Image (cartoon, rainbow, N blue to C red):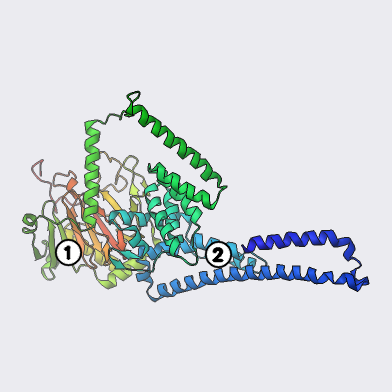
Amino acid sequence: MAATMRASVSVLLLVLLASNWEVEAELFTALADMEELLETEAVLMRTLEGYIEAQEEKMQRLRRHYAEYAKEHEDASRDIQGYLSNPINAYLLVKRLTTDWKAVEAQMVDDVGSGFVENITQYRNVLKFPSDEDLNGAAVALMRLQDTYKLDTSSVARGELNGVQYSTEMSAGDCFELGRQSYNNGDFYHTVLWMQEALERLEEEYNKTAVRSDILEYLAFSTYMQGNVQRALSLTNELLEIVPGHQRALGNKAYYLRDIENSESLKRKGDDGQGSIHAEQPAISEEKLEVQEDELSERDLYEMLCRGEVDLPASVAAKLHCRYVDNGIPFLRLARLKMEEAYLKPLIVIYHDVIYDSEIATIKQTAQPRFRRATVQNYKTGELETATYRISKSAWLKDEEHPHVAAVNQRAQDMAALTISTAEELQVVNYGIGGHYEPHFDFARREETNAFKSLGTGNRIATVLYYMSDVPQGGGTVFPSIKVALWPKKGTAAFWYNLHKNGEGDYLTRHAACPVLTGSKWVSNKWFHEQGQEFLRPCGLSPEE
């Protein structure tokens, strides 16, 4: 409204100046003519008033942004770790420093603000700023959490995760951005969920944080892509009531109408026997169908285990015990380890109180400056590469870097009763927003001929996994094939063999790291290899062993 008024006044002023230029050159010679100058001054005053109102409106918007950012920043500063361990807060922080700040900078561009915007541009070269890729990653992480833990969209928007209130509510603009990121990824299912939530929240907002027509455009097309043409048409008509000349909406409406007409025509042909509406489905081989069912089953089990919905059968749990062990290590006869059996075949155990706070602090501090995006090994080439199914950062530490690292490695050797002389360096991992690692094997399968080739120490025979933090929600280590879930507890470590005694991989050890719902998950891994273990874990005499 203010922009329209400014434009109208500017046009009027130009017309007046153009029409009176010749006459006004001698206005001072007659007092009667100068009376018109009062009207000229009135026009200028109205223009100035419009400009002041527009500037004040802009200042009010900027003050609202500042107040919002200041409040969030103050909340975060009280408990930085606690604040960022909430995935909603983490997503909103990334959003504020990307799309929100771009909008703020756009409002600051004028004679006064340009210098400040230039400073912000310089800061981007010095300070750590998130990218658009970071924003997309944070949004995808929230979608992953929503799916894995079956979180209701409205609850997440209220800052509630699994019934626990963690943060302030999202605005319509926050929900809109989640929907937009989903749309950019071709994820129309989540686009519809979050655009619908944005629409509902927009109705309740006094200071609007999103534009209704923008929400309707995304919502309509995504609804169509999900197969609901009638609703897509209804939403598009609603959009055209707001913006009658919306070109994409007009084009989409014509397309939807043709689609509806064609569908009705096909139905009529089917009803009177003149045509068939049955589409021939491509044949799926039994082998492929079996693979699809297996993958679906594993995925379902994986997510159910992550949600804590699967318990060990009572008959299996009854055979599990806790005890003190020395694993045949002379030193451990003086300081036995607390071992808890989690499963017997394959053997999976938990060792309690085996890594201490001082060691954890050292390892975190040493690893963090070297963190890089965690990689996986391409089974065809043997090369390391990033993957969407593993979201975390990691670093590798050697014994000589600190006595604490050497002590933790030595303790891993005692727990495994294997030599670390051929083991990999200690890998330290921190999981980010919704961080996870989908089902995988630690060992290399027969077809992965290039795996660990550069190490020259054979396959991974066993794994020690240290838990270096508690995780309030999510973040479990789950084994879908045997329906076992291990939950992170600071100071504990999990141990299992990856290979049978005959050297074949134990496929029941396929496992996954569940998405971290709240909290920060820190772990470290020690992977032992075959070479050097000949007398510590001899090969079995039976090919089946």
Q: Position of residue 249 (x, y in %)?
A: 51, 45
Label drawn at residue 161: none
Question: Which label is found at residue 351?
Answer: 1
Residue occupying the point 13% across, 64% down: 339
Above or below for 65 versus 251? below
Q: What residue would you read off at disc 2?
A: 104
User: Which residue occupies 52% across, 48% down?
Assistant: 240
Q: Secondary structure at mark 2?
A: helix
Quadrant occupied by the N terminus: bottom right
Residue 467, quarter of the rendered image: bottom left
Percent of width and height locating residue 159: 35, 65
The CA distance from mark 2 to mark 1 is 52 Å
The x, y position of residue 144, in whole percent, is 33, 54
| Residue toward you, 223 or 353 | 223
Between 484 and 456, which is closer to the camera in this rendering? Answer: 484
- Amino acid marked by disc 2: Val
Can residue 208 be seen by looking at this rendering? yes
Left or right, residue 82 beside residue 245: left
Identify which amino acid the numbered label 1 is placed on: Tyr
Position of 387 with respect to 322 (left or right) is: right
